[in-house]
Amino acid sequence: MLEPGELLPELILQDETGAERRFADLARKKGLVIYLYPKDNTPGCTLEGQEFTALLPRFRRLGYEVVGLSKDSVASHCHFVEKQGLGVTLLSDPDGAFIQGIGAWGEKKMRGKSYQGILRTTVVVGADGRVLKVYPGVKAAGHAEAVLADLRAL
């Protein structure tokens, strides 16, 4: 898992429209909030996306952009945005290279079975590309508000 002070790995991924996006294209004056989530159109991931969307204007007033990131395809992201009315940019990392570079890939358990998957994580990155804060093991409900409160304190 990335630590505060480390540089974010190179970010070049497609968004929900298929456009290639880089860190410099996405970060605002103070930086970028990247929330990594397991799967489009699942209850927790939908809730998290809706909460970040609702608070997006407040993040922007503080000088941060917010993006979601999963291994889902561009087409899946497009459908997810339309179906759920999301306002955040969603990035697709189908091979998981960026997700692994952040350290948000690992063992998970469901119904007694272990498997590898995205560990719900949020990374706040300054405009210089250095990690400011990492939130591992995120619970979706209320998380966006908690991140916003922390950014107000920075």
Image (cartoon, rainbow, N blue to C red):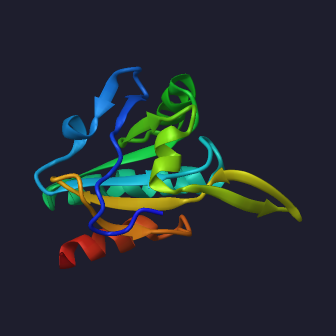
Residue 19: in sight, yes or no?
A: yes
- Residue 86: where, in percent of width, then height? 42, 41
Q: Tell me where residue 10 sits by quadrant.
A: top left
Q: Is residue 105 left or right of residue 4?
A: right
Across and down, in percent, residue 31 comes to: 20, 54
Q: Position of residue 154 (x, y in %)?
A: 18, 75
**Left of 32 or right of it: where is 69?**
right
Q: Quarter of the image holding residue 2?
A: bottom left
Of the pair 45 and 91, the residue shown nearer to us: 91
Location of residue 99 in the rendering, given as x and y in whole percent from the top left corner: 50, 47
Residue drawn where x is 46% and y is 70% of the image? 142
Q: In this rendering, is residue 20 above or below 122?
A: above
Q: Is residue 143 above or below residue 52?
A: below
Q: Residue furthest bottom?
A: 153
Instruction: Left or right? Give the position of 90 relative to 23.
Output: right
Above or below, 63 against 3 in this view is: above
Give above or below for 99 relative to 123: above
The residue lying at 65 percent from left, 48 percent from top is 42
Q: How many marks?
A: 0
The residue furthest left is 29
| Residue 50 visible in the picture | no
**x 36%, y 43%: residue:** 88
Q: Nearer the viewer, residue 77 or 125?
A: 125
Q: Is residue 20 left or right of residue 80?
A: left
Kindly identify the residue that appears in the image at 61 percent across and 49 percent down: 38
Viewer-side residue, 17 vs 100 = 100
